[in-house]
Amino acid sequence: MSDPVLRVDDLHVGYSIGGADVEIVSGVSFELQRGEALGLAGESGCGKTTTALAILQLLDPFLRRLSGTIDLTTENGVVHIHRRTERGMRDLRWAEISLVFQGALNALDPVQRISRQIGDAIRLHDPEADRAAVRERVRELLERVGISPERARQYPHEFSGGMRQRVMIALALACDPEVIIADEPTTALDVMTQAQVLALLEELRRDLGLALLLITHDLAVIAETCERVAVMYAGRIVETGPTATVFAVPQHPYTQRLLGAFPQVGTERALPPAIPGSPPDPADPPSGCRFHPRCHLAREACSHGEMALRPVGDDHESACLFAPLQQTAVGGGVR
Amino acid sequence: MSAAPLASAVTPLAEARGLEVAFRRRGSTVQALDGVDLEWRQNEVLGVVGESGCGKTTLARTLLGLEQPTGGELRFEGATLDRSGVRTLRRRVQMVFQDPYQSLNPRMRVSELVQEPLRMQRMGRAERVLRAATALEDAGLGPAERFWGRYPHELSGGQRQRVAIASALAPEPAGLVCDEPVSALDVSVRAQVLHLLLGLRRTRGLALLLITHDIGLAWALCDRVAVMYLGRVIEIGQASDVLERPQHPYTQALIAVAPSTRPRAPGQAAVLEGEVPDASRLPSGCRFHPRCPRARERCADEDVALRPSGAAGQTAACWYPGFEPRSGLAGERRPADEGPERRRGPFVLHAEL
């Protein structure tokens, strides 16, 4: 059943300062299967967005891929993204991998009609397309994302936040990509609108067989959309597995506490236990398990050596020395 | 949930009756608050939830004396607000904003930031310093000398929010209005700040008004919850009643769409179609009726006020209130040819959401 469309192996991303490497992403590996939705979860600064930008080779100029490989399976065989030049990447972006950003207002050109912006994306990869064909495709895309084609000639500011995010998704679909990377696609939206946009992404994935890499700090959004989840902390994946399993029986103390930070109606009415301290400085990461200075389970052994992901269940891996964990620590907060 | 029944016996901290705030915008008037009835009791944590544009923030600003009511009544500690009343109010109620990266002046040191509100009250230096140091330590930034001379950029996000909380505490308020106090913070730091706020409620006897779009947060933190829609409170009551057995169809929709980390049965999520109407063109009758699955003729014609419904102390502004289990909320599947563009449609079920 394994049919990865995207495979990231031991990816390290960072910058050099005074001869030393500072790693933002520090050995991340995962596979995205065809048609699958994978959630990459973690708080700001954990390296999840950097991972996404490294896949697209859209890293900030001061950041670079230090090592690791990124392979994309296309109709024409496997493409080694890590060996591609900027020119070579242009053929892949939008056509094979698209990106949906958080703030659609910033990603869309405010002075171009949306028909023009989507049309440009189509023409970029199919310069031969005639006007009628492009117009027809724009109509089709807008309908696909639930926008009336009559609005094609409007400007981004004439759309609400949720509608703009739909335009952004139409743009991402323009060249029939295999993979969509969505970075906090609903974070700036209201709950109602968020639910509508998530439902749309889900529908598209099912109908078009897209693979979706969903990046967000909001575990609930991942629970609603993704089959599998990878939880990142301080540049590393600390736990990965099927979403339902990971959320029901989390096997890393960080995942446990993170889940506790999203109280749910109907559960015990209590404040989640707090995680002390704040995430580490990438220039000076803790030794051993990077979570150990903040971990309620930490012991001496946690501060030495490398913590690799180990199997703890069916397709379920944790980087905690003490996994499998007892499942008492999730609730149990105070009020 | 200990304090609430006792607190209702004493005068509320703030009380709004038919409160209105209107803004003029290019000739037309936007009724941001249109008849808000609300009681914020002493020492209670009151949650205000709703979509953006529902008037949550205007309500908060009015309670702080930053907006002038254009109608209705706002009483503070039992007294109607006049000019001098607003002054007292501004001292007795303080605000914690969403984003500590924006709410703190980057050129001021922690010591200045926390003393600033006291300086406004023309308090003497000695007392000011003492109060500021106490406030910092109460906000979990102790010993105060360690943080005294620092600038905001030298602090982490959680520490900045603690500085913001300390400067709100310095004037020794009776109530703290918190507008999305943790949504800009790192997920792992959120719980720390929430623990701090609840702790302050206990140790300083503070009342908290928590404005949030996060239903789960309201559930975990609040004694009572008020749900707002288009400038009005449409349901209010004990948090456990309002969030577990909501009587108003809008509250039910709001809770149903809140993403959850717990698995839900297929068909439990109902998506409310369309968007909140423009506050300058309010619908007739019940303002929720164009999006409401229960709407009947009466709803389009007659406006409805908060009426007792559900548990004791629970009220809802609905002609046909009542709790329906979530699965019964959505009446129909979305027909394939009708996109979400169709405004003000009924509830629509996305079975596999």
Image (spheres, coloured by chain):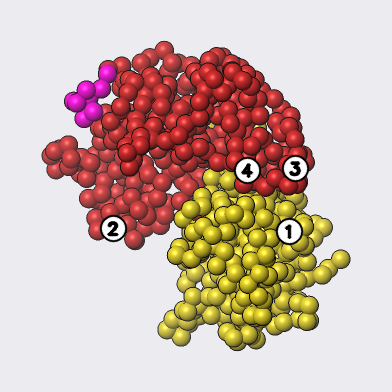
Q: How far apart are marks 1 and 2 (CA)?
A: 44 Å
Q: Which of pointers 3 and 1 indicates the residue nearer the eye?
A: 3
Chain under numbered label 2? B
Q: How far apart are marks 4 and 3 (CA)?
A: 11 Å
User: Which color has been applied to chain A in this rendered view?
Assistant: yellow
| Disc 4 target residue | B342
Does label 2 or label 3 sit earlier along the sequence? Answer: 2
Residue in the picture at 78% in, 77% down = A75
Q: Is there one chain holding both mark 1 and mark 4? A: no
Q: Is there one chain holding both mark 2 and mark 3? A: yes
**Of helix, strand and loop, which mostly describes the magenta segment?**
helix
User: Which color has been applied to chain B in this rendered view?
Assistant: red
Residue A131 at what x, y percent from top left?
63, 72
Residue in the picture at 26% in, 28% down = B89
Q: Is mark 3 on a helix, strand or loop?
A: loop
Q: Which of pointers 1 and 4 indicates the residue nearer the eye?
A: 4
Number of other residues with Cα within 10 Å of mark 4, as a class: few under 14, some 14 to 19, many 20 or more: few
Q: Which of pointers 2 and 3 indicates the residue nearer the eye?
A: 3
Chain under numbered label 3? B
Residue B335's label in the rendered image is 3
| Disc 2 target residue | B106
Q: Can residue A275 be seen in this view?
A: no
| Disc 1 target residue | A205
Q: In the rendered view, does B113 fall on the left or right side of B326? A: left
Q: Do the residues labelled 2 and 3 touch (CB within 8 Å)?
A: no
Q: What element carries label 1?
A: helix
